[in-house]
Image (spheres, rainbow, N blue to C red):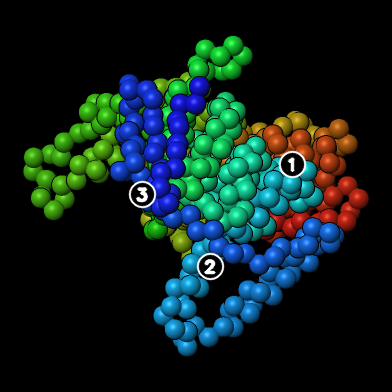
Amino acid sequence: MPPVSIERVGAGGRAVVDFADAGCDYPNVSSSQVGVRRCVARERPARYDAEAPAPRLAEAVATLRAGLEQLAAADVGDAADGELGEALLALAEVQTRLTGQEARVLRTFDAREAYRADACVTAASWLRFRARLGHADAQRRCKRARVLRDMDGLRAALEAGEVSVDHVDAVVRRAIPQRLSTIVEHDATLTELARTAEPRHVAVAVARIVELADPDAADDPPPSCTREDLRGWSVRRGFDGLGVVDAATSPVLTELLLRVRDVFSTPDPPDTPPEQRRTPAQRFHDAVLAALTTALDHDPGSAVGGVRAHFVVFSDLQTLLGRDELARIRPRLGATGEIDAETARHLAATTDPTMRAVLGLVPWLPVSVGRARRTLPPFLRTASQLAHQHCRGPGCDRPYAWAEEDHNKDWIDGGLTALFNSAPLCEAHHQLKHRDGWSITFDPHTGAVTWISRDGTRRIDLPPPEP
Ligand SMILES: [Zn+2]
């Protein structure tokens, strides 16, 4: 039951994509819509002789580096126009093929769990930790490597530079585990389409393949709704204390947000001067804020780690008393970052009792309840959040609320329940610590956390999180 059939027409490589099902929501793709993209099969230099032993990976990478240095030394200004164009085409092809090779190496690295040598729990977090990649970038590379493992045709086409990374990602983005086997079945069809059509057409073809797959297949879970799969939120720090929300909301949440806007938005008083009137977007923002505050006020389970507070402000007592010059820590919000002293005083004056403040706590001040109890009491958890902010595993940024306090020296071995013997670890890092025998120390004077491998040969120093 191939839902998509493709045939090549003419020497130009024009593709005809035939979607059989007339009830489809997606735009039909016909030969006139598919861009003609010549598949350029360039002569390639001979590769390593099949008889010769394969080069070692490190040697091959060193050769590549040397080539790049030669390229960097080349005189671009003296090149003729045609030479520049040829170079750009060649560079685009090399970049694509390099991505194919990166995926090949990453696939093996991931399968062997080689990231555990650095106390990381996923290949993506290892890439963030060691290569300083962004969250989304690291995830994308790992997923691409994993999906290509099963797609021989697409993998070979990428490694040969015959399809672009965008073509591959059009497939990879939609390849959630439940539908991977369906997509893999159509590897040859999708590869052929990727060679001749644009990435967006490949994306449409994948969507159609998934949609037309038999949902009643005996053992297969039904394919999820594509739109639901694409939902997601992230919040990152923007400029000047603002947060930036990237969100793709499901239809239900979209509806709810609009409802919240209607229910919770309040008009500006009639006597508000025109220059102080809020924009529609600002009113929407304020409505969501009001709705979330109401939800936290009325939800009996809104405590995190025993701390029932809508948000946490860390501030020196001197700041709240207006004596900024005597304050030893700068005020900050629990998860968002620093705020100015004036804002801290304003929040302290206006938000009680939804705010919890830690007063007069200098950074890394050792605080302990000794052996009196096994888990950190809520007031120390708040202080720990100030010190650590998130899981202290290498490359890990799972939020503090999702982590458990780990006794650096185990309780069973006489370890104290104290800030200086404690660091938050997510579940995966907890397991990794015990499985691989890492020991962890937290230096309360500097805020650094150190991971030391079982045999003592690997030591990873993690500086304190940035304020
Ligand atoms: Zn972690």
The earlier-in-sequence mark between 1 and 2 is: 2
Could you tell me if residue 305 is visible in this image?
yes
Residue 65 falls left or right of residue 55? left
Which quarter of the figure has residue 374? top right
Q: Secondary structure at mark 3?
A: loop
Image height of 292 relative to 323, above or below: above
Could you tell me if residue 318 is visible in this image?
no
Instruction: Tell me the residue that label 1 is attached to.
Output: 111
Instruction: Tell me the residue that label 2 is attached to.
Output: 91
Disc 1 residue type (three-letter): Ala
Image height of 211 relative to 241, above or below: above
Image height of 296 relative to 244, above or below: above
Residue at screen point 54% across, 32% down:
186
Q: Secondary structure at mark 1?
A: helix
Front residue of 2/217: it is 2
Residue at screen point 54% across, 58% down:
41
Front residue of 118/231: it is 231
Say if disc 1 is inside 8 Å of ligand 1: no
Residue at screen point 69% across, 65% down:
46
Labels 2, 3: front one: 3
The earlier-in-sequence mark between 3 and 1 is: 3
In the rendering, which numbered label is found on residue 35? 3
Residue 421 falls left or right of residue 88? right
Locate the C terminus by quadrant. bottom right
Residue at screen point 56% across, 38% down:
188
Say if disc 2 is inside 8 Å of ligand 1: no
Which quarter of the figure has residue 55? bottom right
Q: Position of residue 416 (x, y in %)?
A: 80, 39
Is disc 3 surrounded by few (<14), some (14 to 19) or many (20+) residues within 10 Å? some
Labels 1, 2: front one: 2
Disc 3 residue type (three-letter): Gly
CA distance separating discs 1 and 2: 30 Å
